[in-house]
Image (cartoon, helix red, strand yellow):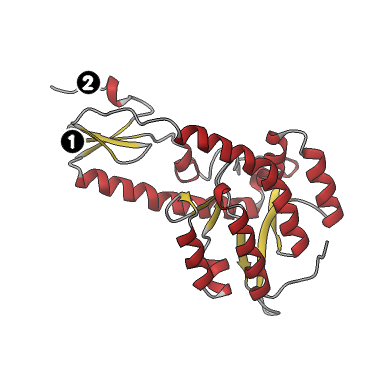
Amino acid sequence: MSSSYLSLTKAKEITINFIKKYKDSLRDSDTCKLITDEDIARYEAMTPSKFFNSGNVQANFGSNFYLFDINYNKSGNTAMIWLGEHTNVNDLTKKITEYSASNEDLLHFWQNEGTWYNLTEARIEALEKIFDQLGAKSKTQTAKKSSKKPVAKKPEVVTISDATEVQNGIAFVDFDAEKFEHALKTGGNNFDPMIDFESENSAQNQIDHAINAFKLAKKELDAFISELVKAKESGAKYVVDSSYTARDEFKFGK
């Protein structure tokens, strides 16, 4: 596998090929939905610098981490890829093989023990191995979920999303919803900066982990605000945390 540094143009080319191959396991960060051919066409129309800086592509499983970024430096801008910590490509390949015995271990290694590395052909091939295993599971789960017919709602209930519903002027929002994890839980369950000793430093408070987590939080807050605006347009005047009191258990009336 080649590990040479890539120009932004070449990096974008192989990244777009990756997205086309694994689009059923990826989601667009703006829509929080699976990437479509229209999304890919939009990515292809971007300049390489804008594409890598826009943070468009996330995994559609685990903590929905971003996959690609850009590093601006004096010697030239470099495309970046998020991968589990490793010393070289051989070490990365060895670790992926080791952790592949368990989907949970492989996911933890890739996301929670990860950081940003220069994007190379060898590293994107390593990411493909991860997606061949974890993405297959994601697609199976998605297919099962999509095969179920939605349950009919009462006319007075307006469904904004899987986390937000409106009834009788109240927006019921699940503040514990996974898609708001990073925004409403100080960077998410896997980010933990609350330590007392230097010896407690770990992947959970690593700075690249923090940056990635709060980039996700920013996107999630935009989605959260969008849902609240839609709820207001549907007649909501108040907000209730449905993880505390479910809508169908809420006591309406004075």
Distance Cα–Cα, label 2 vs label 1: 13 Å
Name the one closer to the observer, 88 or 13: 13
Q: Mark 2 touching mark 1, by CB under 8 A?
A: no
Q: In which quarter of the image is residue 63?
A: top right
Q: How many labels does the image show?
A: 2
| Residue count near mark 2 (Cα–Cα under 10 Å), binned few <14, some 14–19, many ≥20 | few
Percent coordinates x, y for residue 19 in the rendering? 59, 58
Percent coordinates x, y for residue 228 in the rendering? 29, 45
Would residue 8 be found to the left or right of residue 251 on screen? Answer: right
Mark 1 falls on what kind of element?
loop
Q: Which mark is residue 169?
A: 1
Would residue 202 be found to the left or right of residue 97 on screen? Answer: left
Disc 1 residue type? Gly
Please name the residue shown 27% across and 49% down the image: 229
Please identify the quadrant where the N terminus is shown: bottom right
Please name the residue shown 77% across and 34% down the image: 101
* Residue linked to disc 2: 251
Give the mark nearer the N terminus: 2 vs 1: 1
